[in-house]
Amino acid sequence: MENDLAKTAYLATLRHLSHVAPTIAKQIALELQTQRSHLKLIASENYSSLTVQLAMGNLLTDKYCEGYPHHRFYAGCEQVDAIEEEAATLAKELFGADHAYVQPHSGADANLVALWAILTERIQTPFMEKLGRKNPDQLNSEEFETLRQTLCNQTLLGLSLGSGGHLTHGFRQNFSAKMMRAVHYDVDPTSHRLDYGKIAEIARKERPLILLAGYSAYPRHIDFAKMREIADEVGATFMVDMAHFAGLVAGKAFQGVNNPVSYAHVLTTTTHKTLRGPRGGMVLCNKEFRDSVNKGCPMVLGGPLPHVIASKAIAFREALTPEFERYAAQVVANARTLAEELIKEGVSLITGGTDNHLVLIDLSKTPLTGRMVETILVEAGITSNRNMIPFDPEGAWYTSGIRLGTPALTTLGMGSDEMREVARIIAKVIRNCKPESAKSRARATIEPKIMKEARSRVQALLDRYPLYPEIDLEEVACG
Ligand code: PLP
């Protein structure tokens, strides 16, 4: 019944759009067709439920609500207050966190809020107290300049981009390396795993204000107890960016020292990757940082998106179900099977396997770049993304790696048998791929017969696991 209603509403929206904005409706329909004709192995993407998507299409988008529940800079926010409080309550229950701030528009925004809140609590507040002032408006220009420079000189210690960290973890071209002094730890050059002894050594030398853990492309568990110990030893605030694996924490696939919630002072996440919600971000924190985090908007963020917050509440409710726990366990099991089969087929993997939802193929001993393989795989009907491997000689544009993830295919219902088939298709494509010329780092060729076979095997899988089968494009008349 619920599904029938969602389908009717979804189709009605598309039908309406096809009348009033046919060009937009056409692109939406084409996007659905494209997604239906490819196996999605992009580790950071997923398929949200129709309900999650429908919750965003309403008048909440019109509402301004800077501030936080019951403390707004605009009138008429009673309903938005209720929605935001419900989303935050569900998030706290889902993760067992003290406080949840559900406004960030994205993962990068969540990181900005978190870094700013830690700087505020740990540096700005004591600075103001020492001078006997309440806020920076009361400082003269010399005092304000001292505060500004003191904030900028604080050290952020995070995983380097090349070792699988994110741009917002202190990459030099990103704001995070300009608002703070950013230093990095790498994975071990041989095992490609985190080396906690080495991280501790760097932390002792650099004395960071913030020790940041989390990744976009690291296929192994993190021992958050060990990381917290290092942070405590050097007096750092321990921040975890769980953008990639929040769904695995919510679904209890990550437990004990692999669940960061009780170890971190501040956690950030996206809501759209393994968590399977709408595109957005969130900050979780303990009481120490709550007040500053709540001031994220308007101090750091633009006006909240209440329609997206409503959708986050729906996604958190979905993630609180036993079905989601089964999903999270299957995501991890599928990644393991995918990794094992790729290795069996002769494909080399960074760290030789995975503990989470992602696998990082190492092409450095082949004549291929990540760029070549990414392009050829799309032709075969598989979307993935090229990714740097640790200490990558090919750099960030061409790369020597391919990152694969299982969250989306698991949402479609695929299991171990399908993962083995996916691995065999990918391995065969890679084995038969050749650089187009000695000079090319971007283009590769493959025999048409092999490509045809890969494409038809991909199609056979797609036919068995259709995306949004309830949406019939013919019916919408916008295809
Ligand atoms: N943090 C990590 C670890 C990520 O992998 C990403 C995105 O891929 C982000 C933050 C940024 O998320 P968003 O694209 O929503 O800003």
Image (spheres, grey):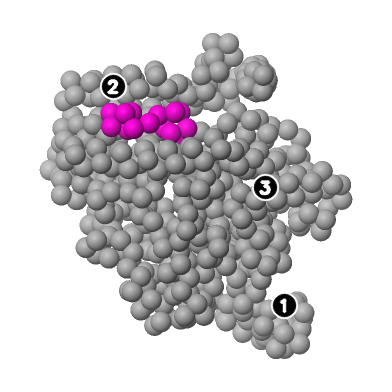
Q: Which mark is residue 136?
A: 1
Query: In the figure, residue 118 lies in which quadrant?
Result: bottom right
- For residue 400, side relative to residue 471 (left or right): left
Residue to which mark 2 is pinned: 457
Residue type beneath disc 3: Leu
Q: CA distance from mark 1 to mark 3?
A: 35 Å
The residue stretch that appears in magenta: 408-421
Label 3 neighbour load within 10 Å: few <14, some 14-19, many 20+: many
- For residue 392, side relative to residue 9 (left or right): left
As for residue 413 lying within the magenta part, the answer is yes
**Does residue 181 appear in the picture of this structure?**
no
As for residue 131 lying within the magenta part, the answer is no
Residue at 76% from the left image edge and 87% from the top image edge:
132
Task: State the count of labels.
Answer: 3
Ligand 1 closer than 8 Å to label 1 CB: no
Label 2 neighbour load within 10 Å: few <14, some 14-19, many 20+: some
Image: 38 above or below 215:
above
Residue type beneath disc 2: Arg
Residue at 31% from the left image edge and 29% from the top image edge:
417
Image: 454 above or below 89:
above
Residue to which mark 3 is pinned: 90
- For residue 33, side relative to residue 199 (left or right): right
Q: CA distance from mark 2 to mark 3?
A: 41 Å
- Which quadrant holds the N terminus? top right
The spot of residue 64 in percent (x, y) is 77, 48
Is 307 in front, or is 404?
404
